[in-house]
Image (cartoon, helix red, strand yellow):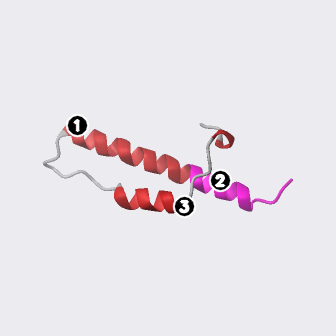
Amino acid sequence: MFDEERMPSVSIELVKALDKRFPDACPLLDDVDRMIWFHAGQRAVVNFLLEICERQNENILAPEK
């Protein structure tokens, strides 16, 4: 999907702060469609950074071949 080597290091502190700021939450019934998609886009970025952070930490802890 993407090349981790081309991504700068993503700190767990940043990801935790963004996760708190943009939580994974269900939309409310009175939310406007545009706002639902806007919030979904924000959350998609957080999920992407979470995945990168996890992969980078796996690579650091993985034994060298």
Which residue appears farthest toward the left when viewing the image? 30
The disc at residue 34 is 1
Q: Residues within 10 Å of mark 1 (few under 14, many from 20)?
A: few
Is tag 2's residue or tag 1's residue first in the polypeptide sequence? 1
Does residue 65 appear left or right of residue 34 in this picture? right
Does residue 55 appear left or right of residue 61 in this picture? left
User: Viewer-proximal residue, 20 or 14?
Assistant: 14
User: Viewer-proximal residue, 15 or 25?
Assistant: 15
Q: Disc 2 on helix, strand or loop?
A: helix
Magenta stretch bounds? 52-65
Q: Residues within 10 Å of mark 2 (few under 14, many from 20)?
A: some
Residue tagged 3: 12
Is tag 3's residue or tag 2's residue first in the polypeptide sequence? 3
Q: Is residue 48 visible?
A: yes
Could you tell me the amino acid type at mark 2? Gln
Q: What's the residue at 58%, 54% (across, down)?
A: 53
Q: Quick check: marks 3 and 1 in contact, CB under 8 Å?
A: no
Q: What's the residue at 23%, 42% (across, down)?
A: 35
Q: Is residue 23 visible?
A: no
Locate residue 57, reporting x and y percent.
65, 58
Q: Is residue 41 magenta?
A: no
How far apart marks 3 and 1 lie (CA) works out to 30 Å
Residue tagged 2: 56
How far apart marks 3 and 2 lie (CA) works out to 10 Å
Check the picture and name the quadrant holding the N terminus. top right
